[in-house]
Amino acid sequence: MLNTLPKINKNDGKRQGRGYGSGKGGHTTGKGSKGHKSRSGYASPRPGFEGGQMPLSRRLPKLKGFTRAYFKTTAATATLTLSALNVFDNGSVVDLKALKDKKLIKASAVKAKVVTKGSLDKKLEFDNLLFSKTAKELVLKAGCTIK
């Protein structure tokens, strides 16, 4: 009966020593010596706080029309090679949905660009895809159509 009861593991974190008998070194009790972190009620400062120094976010100039590239979202363009397109059957329509179904590009991709690497052995119909200059020439030479 007692052996079927679940174990209760109550862990309240590491116990800081209290006094010399704790084995933690007496009065500092494993917290180092002096300073803000050794006091009770310590809380870490807010993000961006630099110890009273003027923070970076306030040191930078507020320019009109200035936007950081970090905040700009760019449409995800996937690249794929000519040889990767050989998985399709002759005469099939290749568009973003078909490429995502065959897992040739990520599901998050908004655009797809075909680049020259390898060769294309099938006659396909391309719909709403981007091509590099040489890839477009090879695709048209292979007898494919681009919409």
Image (cartoon, grey):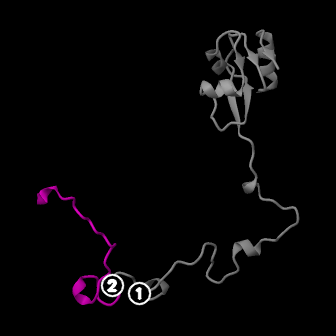
- Secondary structure character of the magenta stretch overall: loop
Position of 12 compared to 114: left or right?
A: left
**Mark 1 Cα-neighbour bin, 10 Å: few <14, some 14–19, many ≥20:** few
Tell me: residue 88, above or below residue 26. Answer: above
Position of 88 compared to 77: left or right?
A: left
Q: Which residue is mark 2?
A: 29
Q: State the image quarter where residue 26 is shown.
A: bottom left
Helix, strand or loop at disc 1?
loop
Query: Which residues are the magenta region?
Result: 1-29
Question: Residue 81, which numbered label?
Answer: none
Residue 15 located within the stretch drawn in magenta: yes
From this viewpoint, which residue is outermost toward the front?
1
- Whole-percent x, y for residue 61 in the image: 82, 71
Rendered-image quadrant of the C terminus? top right
- Whole-percent x, y for residue 16 in the image: 32, 81
In this rendering, does residue 104 appear at all? no
Amino acid type assigned to the residue bearing label 1 in the image: Ser
- Whole-percent x, y for residue 102 in the image: 60, 24
Question: Residues under labels 1 and 2: Cα distance?
Answer: 9 Å
In this rendering, does residue 46 appear at all? yes
From this viewpoint, which residue is outermost toward the left?
1
Q: Which residue is mark 1?
A: 33
